[in-house]
Image (cartoon, rainbow, N blue to C red):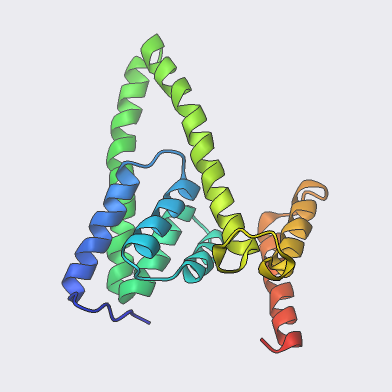
Amino acid sequence: MELNIKGASKGQILKKLFLSTLYLSAFTFGGGYVIVTLMKTKFVDQYHWIDEEEMLDLVAIAQSSPGAIAVNSATFVGTRIAGPGGAVAATLGCILPSCIIVTLLAYIYTKYRKMSLLQGTLTSLRPAVVAMIAKAGVTILVSSFFINGAVELFRENICIRMVVFFTAALVLLRKFKMNPILVMVLCGVANMLFCAAVGS
């Protein structure tokens, strides 16, 4: 289902989708989880094309699907905003910089990989990448654990169900080394059963 965005033609929306994902992909370091956080900032906070809860649902679907989470997220967000055309525009914008930059970097790295300057640059990027991934994780946790994303440590504002699912998933992944896809399926089924039981 496409969104009817007031005051914008289909062409303008597709252009914004392409340029936004192109920009985010070109200037984001740290992998898919980082770009997902920036997509949320762009499409939820800045453009108000989708709401935060819906963005979180789209990320969950992207995480559950085969392939890179950044590309999957761009495809799902594009589809939600502008249908199949939006999916194509957002996906192309997401993958184009990577294709160009990775090709150039592969050539440069192969040619100059022994240079101390290059190694030092790569080493200095690691702490920033870790911080950005951590921010993405915290953002997703806050959106899942706290109602309306407001961090208030009161029982009525905390989604106990999501905390229980998170804890169970963490135990299954860390202690029992269960397949992540199976863990996501189990959490999804458990949530469906819960919603069916309580009628919501």
State the residue in front, 99 or 129.
Answer: 129
- 77 relative to 64 in the view: left or right: left
In the drawing, does residue 41 fall left or right of residue 131?
left
Where residue 135 appears, as percent x and y from the top left, is: 53, 45
Q: Is residue 167 left or right of residue 118?
A: right
Place of residue 102 in the rendered image (x, y in percent of width and height, measured from the top left):
34, 36
Q: Quadrant of residue 91?
A: bottom left
From what the image shows, is residue 168 above or below residue 27?
A: below
Image-based side of 155 in relation to 26, left or right = right
Q: Residue at x 74, y 66 (%)?
A: 155
Q: Residue at x 39, y 66 (%)?
A: 77
Q: In this rendered view, identify the residue nearer to me: 89 or 167.
A: 167
* For residue 184, above or below residue 126: below
The quarter of the displayed image where residue 41 is located: bottom left
Specify the quadrant that holds the N terminus: bottom left
Q: Is residue 7 above or below residue 46?
A: below
Residue 115 point in image, percent of width and height: 38, 11
Residue lying at 33% horizontally and 53% vertically, measured from the top left: 94
